[in-house]
Image (tube, rainbow, N blue to C red):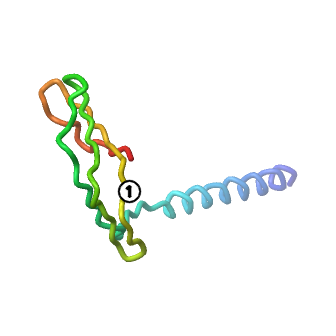
Amino acid sequence: MKRTRILKPIITCVFSAALFIADFAIAQTTEISSEFLMTLYIPTHPPQEIDSALLIYNFKEGGWVKGPKINGKLVAPGADWARVLPGGQHPPGCPRHY
């Protein structure tokens, strides 16, 4: 009789934990969504080569940004830089720095 009283709470606890873990595992999903934010136009001067692996692009006047929730003109001065790989190509997904 005592053995049943001890096992029942343990079995209930283990069963509840298993349901929680199973429910948690099923509930996880990955969903990627995107939305259009803006179009960015930046006219640039020819790049300045700092060394064989670094280019600096200075912005010209006349840049703009347009989108559903944004509309504006870019004010010079501004610049961006790019790293160049040894083979001469820019790294994929090369970040822009403004």
Q: Quadrant of the N terminus?
A: bottom right
Callout 1: 10 Å neighbours few (<14), some, many (20+)?
few
The residue drawn where x is 26% and y is 32% is 83
The residue drawn where x is 51% and y is 64% is 27
Q: Position of residue 70 (x, y in %)?
A: 41, 71
Q: Position of residue 85 (x, y in %)?
A: 20, 28
- Compared to residue 10, the image places residue 83 above or below, namely above
The residue drawn where x is 67% and y is 59% is 16
Q: Position of residue 29 (x, y in %)?
A: 44, 62
| The one of 62 and 94 positioned closer to us in this rendering | 62
Q: Secondary structure at mark 1?
A: loop
Quadrant housing residue 45: top left
Q: Residue furthest left?
A: 87
| The one of 68 and 21 positioned closer to us in this rendering | 68
On the picture, is 95 further left or further right than 12? left
Q: Amino acid at mark 1?
A: Val
On the picture, is 70 further left or further right than 55? right
| The one of 52 and 30 positioned closer to us in this rendering | 52
On the picture, is 60 further left or further right than 87? right
The residue pinned by badge 1 equals 75
Quadrant housing residue 4: bottom right
Q: Position of residue 72 (x, y in %)?
A: 38, 68
- Compared to residue 47, the image places residue 44 above or below, namely below
Q: Residue furthest bottom?
A: 68
The residue drawn where x is 17% and y is 41% is 46
- Compared to residue 73, the image places residue 55 above or below, namely above
